[in-house]
Image (spheres, rainbow, N blue to C red):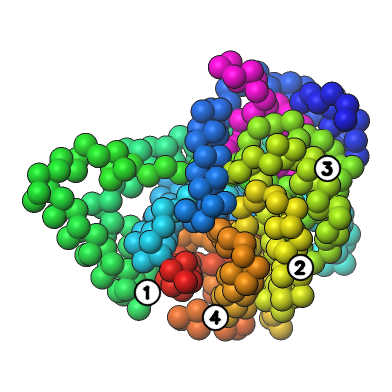
Amino acid sequence: MTTWSKTSWQNFTALQQPKWPDQKEYEQTVEEISKLPPLVFAGEIRALKRQLAMVAEGKAFLLQGGDCAEVFNMCTAPAIREFLKVILQMTVILGYAGGKPVVKVGRIAGQYAKPRSSDTEMVNGVELSSYRGDMVNGIEPTPEARRPDPKRMLKGYYLACSTMNIVRAFTRGGFAALDRVHAWNNEFVKNSPQGQLYEKLARNIDNAINFMKVVGLDTDNIPQLQQASFFTSHEALLLGYEQALTRQDSTTGGWYDCSAHMLWIGDRTRQLDSAHLEFFRGVLNPIGMKVGPKHDIEELKQIINKLNPDNEAGRLTLITRFGAEKIGDHLPNLAREMKKEGFNLVWSCDPMHGNTYTAETGYKTRNFDNILQEIRSFFEIHWAAGTVPGGVHFEMTGENVTECTGGGRNILDEHLVKNYLTNCDPRLNAEQSLELAFQISEMIRG
Ligand code: PEP
Ligand code: CO
């Protein structure tokens, strides 16, 4: 293999990159970002890798989730707080009821670039360039808005910094302390059956903490009770942006992509000879890789050897996204083959991207039962194969949206119009997310 550098990907074909109209302006922007501070530190990235190594062994559970596409004008404290509340609630449910520590990773603070199946789309009879995420172009259906603008990468960097800052404040500054477990129950959810179930669980946690106080433990000074460890991730699609944030760690000399703790490679850009793979083989972050129905097992083996030649646990997470109907055709063989190779892997289930359909009303949606069914099959297939069902990967929000059908409130196709806000794929709302967490906690216990 040739020598790796943070720019060596440029000698390979990079799919899904915007056609920046002004190459010089693009290069200057990448240069500018490369001088700005990193978003995360190498030590934090290594901490996540250690936690993921526990997931690979079945000693912890990975919960990864957030927007399909983060939106610049939703970078607000309330939106981020509501999202964190749901993640924290799910953590409590999965951890308390499921009985395993939960590794929390957000699709947040940089999930601004999207791969698209088509370069253009028709809007009211006009052909427009596709929306590729707020870091590339605007979603408004006009030729001007859809023109890729590298300055958006810079804005994305600053908004990712703001997001990171408030996330750190929320998770470290007392908001995530376990004695606030009731405060995470969101107004919208509180009176629902899920909210009530959650309240019950929260009371048990209160009792446990009170008991610790009774026996003399100083719970105010136990960091595990006062803070939550929370990590960030996004699909590392725009390689110029990722390159700009790739830094050499001064303590170990290793290269880390400091745009987020964990990065993943999408199902559309993970070819063996792709620029994305070249970039990722050289950075030491934990890497996720999406795997959909169109994979080739032999190619996957080569990809895995390239990304993780030392077979380090925690380095690689395979995020499968087959759909409820197809998972049974693909995952049993995949799990068996990977096990035969002796690969150390985290297996995670993305039950969203293989279950998308267009409702009669024209909205792109996903049904709760299909999502749940794919997760159930994921657990059963891994148990049968002797591999570890390690985690889940959701598109979700703390907002009271109507984007996915079904769930406790039985959202129907005709309800989608009420509060359909996503810029890209449909997300679970807070109540649907909690409902899934309760179901999954039972699966974790086996
Ligand atoms: C995504 O996670 O939003 C996505 C585009 O996924 P995939 O690469 O699996 O299609
Ligand atoms: Co998506």
Q: Nearer the viewer, residue 212 or 412?
A: 212
State the separation of the CA atoms marked 2 and 4. Answer: 31 Å
State the separation of the CA atoms marked 4 and 3. Answer: 35 Å
61 magenta-colored: no
Q: In the rendered image, which residue does mark 3 sit on?
A: 17
x and y percentages locating residue 438 in the rendered image: 42, 71
Q: In the rendered image, which residue does mark 1 sit on?
A: 194
Q: Earlier in the sequence, mark 1 or mark 2?
A: 1
Q: Nearer the viewer, residue 403 or 392?
A: 392
Amino acid type, callout 4: Gly
Amino acid type, callout 2: Asn
Q: Earlier in the sequence, mark 3 or mark 1?
A: 3
Front: mark 2 or 3: 2
Q: Is residue 333 above or below residue 270?
A: below
Residues drawn in magenta: 235-261
Q: In the rendered image, which residue does mark 2 sit on?
A: 333
Q: Which mark is residue 406?
A: 4
249 magenta-colored: yes
x and y percentages locating residue 331 in the rendered image: 72, 68
Q: Answer few, some or many: residues within 10 Å of disc 1's Cα (few below 14, many 20 plus, some between 14 and 19).
A: many
The residue tagged with tag 4: helix, strand or loop?
A: loop
Residue 368 seen in the current view: yes
State the separation of the CA atoms marked 1 and 2. Answer: 36 Å
The residue tagged with tag 3: helix, strand or loop?
A: loop
Q: Earlier in the sequence, mark 2 or mark 3?
A: 3
Q: Earlier in the sequence, mark 4 or mark 1?
A: 1
Q: Nearer the viewer, residue 313 or 247?
A: 313
